[in-house]
Image (spheres, helix red, strand yellow):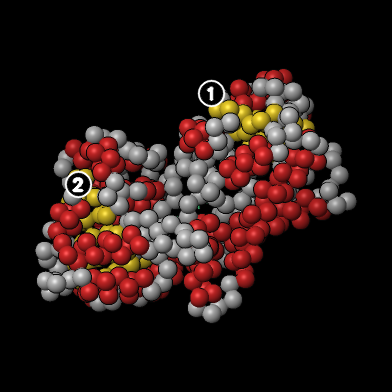
Amino acid sequence: MRIGVIGCGYVGLVTGACLADVGHEVVCTDNDLTKIDALNRGEIPIYEAHLDEVVERNHRQGRLTFMGNMAEAVSAVEATFICVGTPPLEDGSADLSSIENVARLIATEARGPQLVIEKSTVPAQTGQRLKRALEIYNHSGINFRVASNPEFLRESTAVMDFLHPPRIVVGVEDETSEQQLRSLFDPILHQTFQCPVHEAKCPPTTPPTFIVTSINSAEIIKHASNSFLAMKICYANLLADLCDRLGADVEQVTQAMGLDPRIGPSFLSAGLGFGGFCLPKDVQAFIHLGEKAGIDFGLLRQVELINKKRIDRFLERAKEELWILKGKQVGMLGISFKPDTDDIRFAPSLELIKRLQGEGASVRAFDPQALQKAKALFPALEACGNEYQAAEGADALMIVTEWPQFKDLDWKRVRKSMARPLVLDGRNLLDPAQMRAWGFEYFCMGRPNPGSTPAGG
Ligand code: UGA
């Protein structure tokens, strides 16, 4: 199938590259011409596992092209995926102006019938608006159909998530669109393609469930899923605070809870809370949508609040130990919003750095991927070449992102180099008993410190 993808950000690039990899002919376009030029030179603007090899192979073999001329890109395809950004506006609702611009472009430039698919995360009823915009600006009598195909790609595993998803959701209005999407996703539905990742690392190929819904339902499924994940994390964080107070261990609690198949084990890791460009923005947009529809979304307002308070709580803990932040040197391990990505958007680290620096502490940080981006935001941040430099001379070392490599540091060396061997582990990455045994003052989230009394007891 000849497919167009508008928007070469995270979602667009992964979608375009993976659809080409399973055998389609894909043309990707973007209004940022520097991005298109870079892609044509073989440069990938984001750090995402396996994406470079998939893009390179398909580009070289001619199935994947990058075109700066957006009008030309959408003119002769059978289906177009809209993957443009829908950033939050001041009031928390999603900015849909890029979606409208794209609708106008397709309506005026398409030369034949087309299925227009929303892949960007949008509030319910956007599909109807999209359809209307396509009708209004279409002066050639072309038949457009609209569908929704929400993405459930996690940064850092996006390629694998696309190729081996547990479910593919399509919101459609007619049989033809459903059939077209079924055949478009056929290689993935039947797992008949050659997986680009070495077989040993390839997840078991259980075929995904293909779920056909109305467009409105598909749009809601996306917001509802991300908001539910955010809620689960917040619940674990509430439990962590309770465990801190009462001397229990949140990991024991959540592990046992997670074994109940009705609850499930994932997204119950307590820590500094959720960040990134999706969960915070989608919770906000969902609250906005719900309240506009007259539904009390107080539950999700609490989720936002609980998440915001994670940083307060962590800093309170730091101050209990450090007393005065002014003039103190804080080492920070991890800046990206989660491991295996260079993305720092809405990362908890940003608020932490801002507040530590605001109170007069100096921050020396290390992150395997995100340092450059952080340095651009915080010129006073000292970017360190490795973990040991970040710890050297520090009055406290904070673990903010759970990059696995931090586990394997020579912690005895770290302790010797610090001004005070105080480790505040915001991600429960390390073993409390071991850290104590190595001579650290060690604090984490909701796990008891051997030898210390619970905060409330
Ligand atoms: C999220 C969803 O997981 C994807 O399914 C969705 O497609 C994507 O948003 C999107 O809307 O595009 P992502 O933003 O990549 O994916 O990140 P997650 O893996 O969901 O993590 C979000 C945040 O929650 C991170 O800051 C992570 O550290 C935090 N988290 C996650 C926890 O604090 N505890 C957990 O147990 C899990």
- Amino acid found under the numbered disc labelled 1: Gly
Q: Is mark 1 within 8 Å of ligand 1?
A: no
Horizontal and vertical percent position of residue 187: 25, 56
Q: Earlier in the sequence, mark 1 or mark 2?
A: 2
| The N terminus - image quarter | bottom left
Asked if disc 1 and disc 2 are in contact, CB closer than 8 Å, the reply is no
Residue at 15%, 42% in the rendered image: 62
Is 124 on the left-hand or right-hand side of 415? left
Q: Which mark is residue 385?
A: 1
Q: Give the residue furthest to the right.
A: 457
**Crowd band around label 1 with a 10 angstrom C-alpha radius: few (<14), some (14–19), many (20+):** few
Residue 343, horizontal then vertical, whole percent: 47, 42
Look at the picture and state if 285 lies above or below 44.
below
Look at the image and tell me whether residue 251 can be seen. no
Query: Which numbered disc covers residue 310?
Result: none
62 to the left or right of 419: left
Per the image, label 2 sits on a secondary structure element best described as: strand
Separation of marks 1 and 2 at Cα, in angstroms: 38 Å
Image point (22%, 74%), residue name: 136
Q: Which residue is mark 2?
A: 67
